[in-house]
Image (spheres, rainbow, N blue to C red):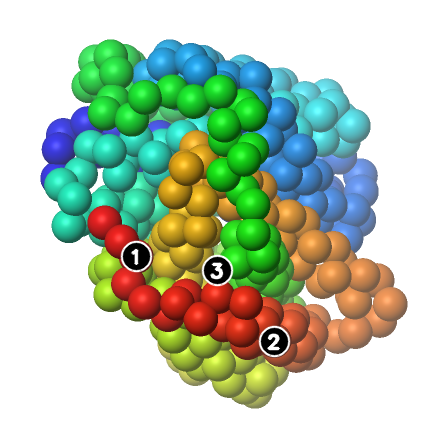
Amino acid sequence: MPFALYPLVLAAFAIGTTEFVIMGLLPDVAADLAVTIPQAGLLVSSYAMGVVVGGPILAVATSGLPERRTLLGLFGLFITGNLLCALAPGYAMLTVARVITAFAHGTFLGVGAVVAMDLAPAPRRAEAVGYLFSGITLANVIGVPAGIALGHAFGWRWTFGAVAALAIVAAGLLALSLPAATARPPKSVLEELKGLRGAPFWTALALTVACSGTLLCLFTFITPFLLEVTRVSHSQVTQILLLYGIGLTFGTVGGGRLAARSLLRPIAWGLTLAMGILLAMPYLGQHLGSCALGLFFWGMISFGLCPILQTLVMAHAPDAPTLASTLNQSAFNLGNALGASVGSLALSHGQPLAYLPWTCAGLSCVALALVALHARVSPRAAQPHPT
């Protein structure tokens, strides 16, 4: 793979860290800002909705600009948002800062996926998307556990300050390594919008929402789940999340390779296997070993779907790659917001943490129904992505 791909992976690593580390710091943030755990969980939803709204807006606003300039400008916004998170005096300001950070997230990964495909040799374009997403999963292996440990040791604000510092390094490497122009010529907004026609594109986008919601319904509250159900210590939470993150990395790289061969079939199998683990999780969660293994395989399977879903959406919009890619990032985060909100609603209405995975399994059924719908409107969806 070209060297320029690796600064993109580092940038995705910073994005993944700031997105997911808040979940491991929910008890700390809630205690410091005098809010409840469900209220703190809404910081996840507000970030996700920032991606949903901000991604398409910034994709349209930057349409026609050189991709290098777009990526660097977006990362400047990302750095600003993280610094504001570190300095936020209260819950309201932290929410605003998270939304500012989120605005850069969707468009950066959307444009970044297009750039990654342009940088890679033709037979390995889908794999390049998997590499980009591996930055998100590596964040869960290294960035999130390190951020949680830093937050527990010095306060959660230091975590966001550290992410901002890492993002500055990534921005510098991007400026040095990205070509001034990529092979794909810029398109106008109207040209991109015309490329989003057809039921297959929109059902693929809905499938991304459903799959993402299934994951975040439980993962948003994974730290309280481990503390209260599995009854582990804070240090053990970090270790389990490290193992979980390793599973995510294996899944993302493997999913990128599967996307070059088939699309819809591995999504169906992945959802089915993940649902089986979720149904067993109230029992697996009672013991440290079984819980850790369950989360490892659940994370590996669930995150393995991400590059496949990204490739599926882009395959149905070949004439609008940038906007389609960005909209899929919005779809991922709309699913994040819905999943986190469903989990928060279930807990607020008295569902025990131990049985929250069953709610997530119910969302998996919705995703499987969308797989069947997409197969009907797009009979060729199971075919390999044309590279």
Classify the position of the N terminus by image quarter. top left
Residue 74 rendering spot, x and y as whole percentages: 47, 19
Residue 385 is tagged as 1
- How many other residues sit within 10 Å of disc 1, few (<14), some (14-19) or many (≥20)? many
Element type at mark 2: helix
Give, as a three-letter code, the residue at label 2.
Ala
- The label nearer to you, 1 versus 2, is 1
Give the distance between the C-alpha atoms of the residues marked 3 and 1, in whole angstroms: 38 Å
Residue at image position (44%, 15%) is 64
Residue 306 visible: no
Q: Can you name the residue that lies furthest to the right here? A: 349
Element type at mark 1: loop
Instruction: Say whether disc 3 or disc 2 marks the residue closer to the N-terminus.
Output: 3
- How many other residues sit within 10 Å of disc 2, few (<14), some (14-19) or many (≥20)? some
Q: Nearer the viewer, residue 172 or 379?
A: 379
Residue 8 rendering spot, x and y as whole percentages: 30, 31
As displayed, is residue 272 above or below residue 202?
below
Instruction: Say whether disc 1 or disc 2 marks the residue closer to the N-terminus.
Output: 2
Give the distance between the C-alpha atoms of the residues marked 3 and 2, in whole angstroms: 34 Å
Residue at image position (44%, 51%) is 316
- How many other residues sit within 10 Å of disc 3, few (<14), some (14-19) or many (≥20)? many
Residue 369 is tagged as 2
Give, as a three-letter code, the residue at label 1.
His
Residue 48 rendering spot, x and y as whole percentages: 63, 42
Residue 80 rendering spot, x and y as whole percentages: 54, 16
Please state the total of marks drawn on the protein image: 3
Instruction: Say whether disc 3 or disc 1 marks the residue closer to the N-terminus.
Output: 3
Q: Nearer the viewer, residue 82 or 176?
A: 176
Element type at mark 3: helix
Give, as a three-letter code, the residue at label 3.
Val
Q: Which residue carries the number 3 mark?
A: 237
